[in-house]
Image (cartoon, grey):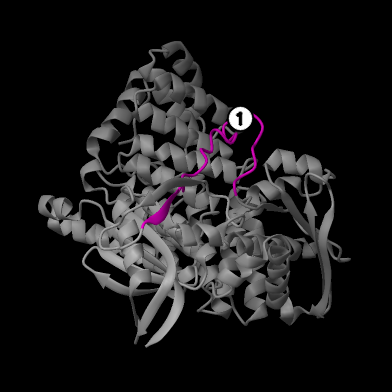
Amino acid sequence: MERKLAVILAGDVAGFSRLVAFNEEDTLATLAVFTATIGDLVTEHGGRIFGTAGDSMVAEFQSAVQGVRAAVAIQRALHRRNADLPPDRRMDFRLGMNLGDVVVSGSDLLGDGVNVAARLQEVALPAGICISGTVRDQIEGKLDFPIVRLGDRKLKNIPRPILVHRVDWSLKDPVEAGALGGPLTLPDKPSIAVLPFVNMSDDPEQEFFADGLTEDIITALSLYRWFFVIARNSSFAYKGRAVDAKQIGRDLGVRYIVEGSVRRSGTRLRVTGQLIEAETGVHLWAQRYDREIADIFAIQDELTQQVVGAIEPEIIIGESSRALLRTTDNLDAYECHMRGMWLHNAQDTAEHFSEAIAWHRRAIALDQDFGRAHMMLARSLYARCFHGFSTDVDKDSTELRLAAERAVALDGRDPYARYAMCLANFVAQKASDAVAEAQQAIDLTPNLAIAHMALGWTRIFTGHFAQALDPLHMALRLSPHDPLTYLILDRIALSHYHLGNYEEAAHYSERGLSLRRAYFNRVVFLASLGQLNRQDDARRLMPEILANVPADIEHYWNILTPYANDGHYAHFLDGLSKAGFPVVA
C-alpha cells in the first residue's frame, strides 16, 4: 500500500434531509451554488476534492495552514451567501479537519486519517470548524484565527480519544473597526495601501500611465484574499499630497504602505517601488526595474510578488497558482484602456465619461478579446447613466450589458467583470441576478470595495434590508476616503428607510449630502423627511431637486429603483408622496 501524511477536510450540510423534504428543487439549486464556491476555494488554497456524495465532500491539502485558511474562507463565503436566502432555506456546512496517515488508492484517499476528519465534522456545530490536535500543532503561531480547545473527545468508531479544537472564523465587525467614524483599527490580516506612483517623466501627459500602473498593482494585491487591501479610490485621495507614512497608516487603518515612481522615455521604462511599515516608517523592501515598456506586465507581477513575499512569504507558496486577470499583448490597446480608466476615475462629468467611453471603444477595436476593456466600457456607460448624463439611457444600457457579458465570457474569474455584470443586471431590472454577480465578485476578491457596495445595494432591492448594512459598512472600511462615500451612505440611509428607522435614514442621508448633493441622495432624504412629517424641510429641499433632474428622467428612474417587490417600491414612493414630490412612476 502507498501511504502518506495528508491534511483532510471533511464537510456536510447540517439538516440536509429536512431542507430537501421542505423544498427539494430550491435546496438542490442552493447546494449546487455552495459546492461550486467550496470547490473554487479548495483549489485556490492548493487543495483538491477527492470525494463527494450527496451533500458531503472530502478534500486533501498539502499544508495545514492552507487547509485551515480554506475552511475559514469557505465558512465566510457561505455565511455571506446565506444572508440572501430565507431563514428556512439557509444551508450551513459543518467542517472537520485532521492531519494523519492515509492510504492512497488511485485518486482516492482512505484510512484512519480520513475517518477522523469525518468524525470531527460530525461534532462541529452548523457553520462550524473543528480541527484535531495534530492540525492545531501545525498552525501554531502561523494564523490569527482564535482557536478554542474543546478537550479530548471519544468519536464514533475511533478507538482512541481525539483532542478537538474549534476555529473561530467570525469576521471583525466593520463598524467596530471604525467604518462609520472614529479611529480605524487594524484588520486581523496584513493590511496594505498602495499610494499613487509618481510620474517622473518629462511629459505630464504620462500621468495616466503612472496611475494605471498603480491601479494594476492594487488589483494584483487584492487577489490575495488573506491580505486587506485599501481600495484604489481611497489610496488616490493622497495623490500629490506630502503626508508621512505614519499619518496615512492611521488615516486608512493599515500596517503597510507601498509607494513608488514611474519614468517613461521612448520604449524604456523605469519603475521604483518600496514597502514601508506605517507605524515605524521603516523601509522593509525597495526595488528598481529598468525594462522595455513591453515588460510592463512582468514588472507589475514581480513587484507584487516581492511586496507579498516581504510581508508573508507563505502566502506566495499557497496562492502562486492563482488565476491572474487576462490582459492583452497589444500595448496600444492597453494604453487606450489605461487612458480610458484614467478619465473614468478623474472626475464624474459628462465630458470625462464620454471621452472614457471613446478610449474603451478604441481599446476594443485594437483587441476584441481584451476583457478588461469591455469591463471598463460597461462601467463607464453605467456611470454616465447613473449620474444622469445619458440622453438615451436605453441605448447606453443595451451597450453596457453587451460589454459586461463579453467581459465575463472572456474572463469569468475577473471580479471586476462580475461587478460590471451586476450593474448590467440592475439596468435590466434583474435585482436577484445582480445579487448573484455581486456575490461572485466578492468570492473572487474579498478586497473589492465596490463589490461590497454593490451587494448592499442589490440586497436593498431584493428586500434584504438588514442584511444590506454589513457589506455597505465593509465597503466603507475597505475604502475609508472614497469619493463614492456619499453613495454608500445613501444606500445605508435607504436600508434604514425600509426598516422603518426614518430618523437613522435622515441622519445618513444628511451625512451623504454633506459630501455630495447628488440627485438620488436628495430623493432618499426627501422620502425620509416625508415619513417623519418634516414637511417644512421637504419644501425647502424640493426646488433643489427639481432644478437638477437628469436628462432622461423616466429611464434613469427605472435603473435607480429596480425593486423586486412592488410593495417595497410602494413604500419608497409613499415617503416621497408625503413629502409632496411629483413621483415619476
Measured from the top left, where is residue 530 in percent x and y?
38, 19
Measured from the top left, where is residue 513 in percent x and y?
56, 29
556 relative to 219, above or below = above
Quadrant where the image shows the C terminus: top left
Residue 285 is left or right of residue 105, and the answer is: right
Residue at image point 67% right, 72% down: 301
Give amino acid for label 1.
Answer: Gly
Residue 117 is left or right of residue 318, and the answer is: left
Secondary structure beneath label 1: loop
The residue identified by callout 1 is 181
Task: Please say whether residue 426 is visible from this viewpoint.
Answer: no
Give the dominant element type of the magenta stretch: helix, strand or loop: loop
- Foreground pick, 204 / 89: 89
Q: Which region is colored magenta?
A: 161-188
Category of crowding for the residue at label 1, using alpha-carbon neighbours closer than 10 angstroms: few (below 14), some (14–19), many (at least 20):
few
201 in magenta = no
